[in-house]
Image: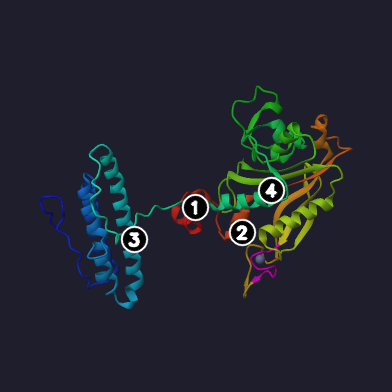
Amino acid sequence: MTTSCRGTLAYTVPKLTDYSAAALEKAAGELLSVLKEEADKSWKSETDWKTFRDRWLSRKNGILTLVNDLWLKTAPKEAKRAVGQKVNEIKLEVEHAVEMTEGLQLEWATTSQPASTADSVDISLPGVRRPIGAEHPVMKTWREIVSVFQKLGYSVAEGPVVETDYYNFEALNFPPNHPARDTQDTLFIAGQQSKPQRERLLLRTHTSPVQIRTMEKMRPPIRIVIPGTVHRNDPPDASHSPMFHQIEGLAVDTNITFGDLKGTLDHAMKALFGSSVKTHFRPSFFPFTEPSAELYVTCFICGGSGKRGADPCRPCKQTGWIEVLGCGMVDPNVFEFVKDNGYDPRKVSGFAFGMGVDRLALLKYGVDDLQYFFQGDVRFLQQFG
Ligand SMILES: [Zn+2]
């Protein structure tokens, strides 16, 4: 390729005769290198930029129009798809280059003479597209869950990610030898050995410490939902991450029963997964609730049949049920820690529940590897835009 002496490259869009991937790649490569060179020179004045914009984007004989006419329209049927994809890529590159150089040119304009208003505007040109971001699937799921409980009158409470042993374990009735206190599960802050155990700092392993912190500040009745980031010493794999998200709920009042717990969560699951899901409680154990249960919903992927067509349904392992959260009635021992603020276990009762946001997002969007959520790969995230 040759360059003329004054900036504009002697480039014309070639006719394609060979539509193989290699030929297409070569032609696109040449075009994009010309684009880059011209973009580098086009920001210095408004006139240069407009020439650049029109040369590439003008509907009549602009380079993009020619690419469309000479490459895509003439492509044989079997090559259409590949050529179409390539032409789209080129289009995005060109629009991006024009947009970027316009930004630079505007900076230039603010330090120079204002542009003449007599300059005509070519209204046939496409507008400058500003790509807008979209909500991350985990945050979207987070927001949906929180909003279900907000509609039931719950308020949102938050707390620190770096917690003390007291709030993370002791006040939640974790006995001293409970496995969750083990360094295998908990990420402790270094250099805390000289402090008494209850004051030692760690990265909270659940959002439950916020239950205690809220009850210390607010007298009953309370209804709170607690979203947040938590950490555990789990190596990253398809279903684990050292950082993940939980949403926790707590309701305390006089005469709260397990019936209230069931009714609330049954309603919440129907609001989240559709009115046809059924809920099912199985006995479980958590240190801070008694009795405790795991809540299952009918698989919202296979509708509870355990099958997808002739294939087994993987997310529910063919059982037709998916475990969604842990819950239970607040253990009276937990109330003992905040008794002085009106939480006398003989007078009040309550229920609590907690769920993993990331796992629900995985199920909801049919993603098979948790790591995709945290790698920041725009190609993955764009699919949810
Ligand atoms: Zn299923």
Q: Is 74 in the magenta?
A: no
Magenta segment: 298-307
Q: Whole-percent x and y of residue 352? A: 76, 45
Disc on the earlier residue, 4 or 3: 3
Please report the residue visible at 85 percent of the width from the left and 49 percent of the height from the top: 257
Q: Whole-percent x and y of residue 169? A: 72, 35
Q: Secondary structure at mark 1?
A: loop
Distance between mark 4 and mark 3 Cα atoms: 43 Å
- The three-letter code of the residue at mark 2 reads Leu
Screen quadrant of the N terminus: bottom left
Q: Whole-percent x and y of residue 226? A: 67, 43
Disc on the earlier residue, 3 or 1: 3
Establish if 240 lies above or below 200.
Answer: below
Residue tagged 2: 363
Badge 3 vs badge 2, beta-carbon distance below 8 Å: no
Residue tagged 1: 134
Badge 4 vs badge 3, beta-carbon distance below 8 Å: no
- The front one of 44 and 200 is 44
Distance between mark 3 and mark 1 Cα atoms: 21 Å
- The three-letter code of the residue at mark 3 reads Glu
Residue tagged 4: 150
Using a 10 Å C-alpha cutoff, classify the residue at mark 1 as few (fewer than 14 neighbours), some (14 to 19) or many (20 or more).
Answer: few
